[in-house]
């Protein structure tokens, strides 16, 4: 569980860093956001016992 929480935090920090110098529609920001979404979905599945 700690591993996924750490990954989510890393992805959040990267997304914040990218958003300072790029538009929200920039492909890199979209990719980082999608990675973050996947990690959060996996975390939610873990909490529900579905993963």
Image (cartoon, grey):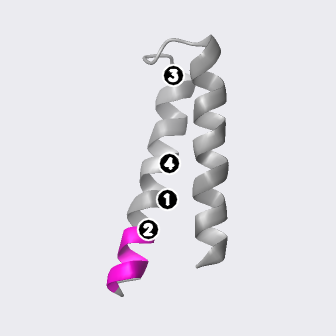
Dot 3: within a 10 Å radius of its alpha carbon, few (fewer than 14), some, or many (20 or more) residues?
Answer: few
Disc 2: which residue = 42
Task: Provide residue 3's location: percent of width, then percent of height.
Answer: 66, 72
Task: Provide residue 48's location: percent of width, then percent of height.
Answer: 32, 82
Disc 3: which residue = 27
User: Where 1 sits versus 11, above or below?
Assistant: below
Disc sitting over residue 36 in the figure: 4
The picture quadrant where one finds residue 21 is top right
Dot 4: within a 10 Å radius of its alpha carbon, few (fewer than 14), some, or many (20 or more) residues?
Answer: many
Question: Is disc 4 in contact with disc 1, using a CB cutoff of under 8 Å?
Answer: yes
The quadrant of the image that shows the N terminus is bottom right
User: Where 2 sits versus 23, above or below?
Assistant: below
- Rounded to the nearest angstrom, the CA distance separating label 2 from label 1 is 5 Å
Residue range in magenta is 43-48
Query: Is 46 covered by the magenta stretch?
Result: yes
* Marked residue nearer the N-terminal end (1 or 3): 3
């Amino acid at each position: 569980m700690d591993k996924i929480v750490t990954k989510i935090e890393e992805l959040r920090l990267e997304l914040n860093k990218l958003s300072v110098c790029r538009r929200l529609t920039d492909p890199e920001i979209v990719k980082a956001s999608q990675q973050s979404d996947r990690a959060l979905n996996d975390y939610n599945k873990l909490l529900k016992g579905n993963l």
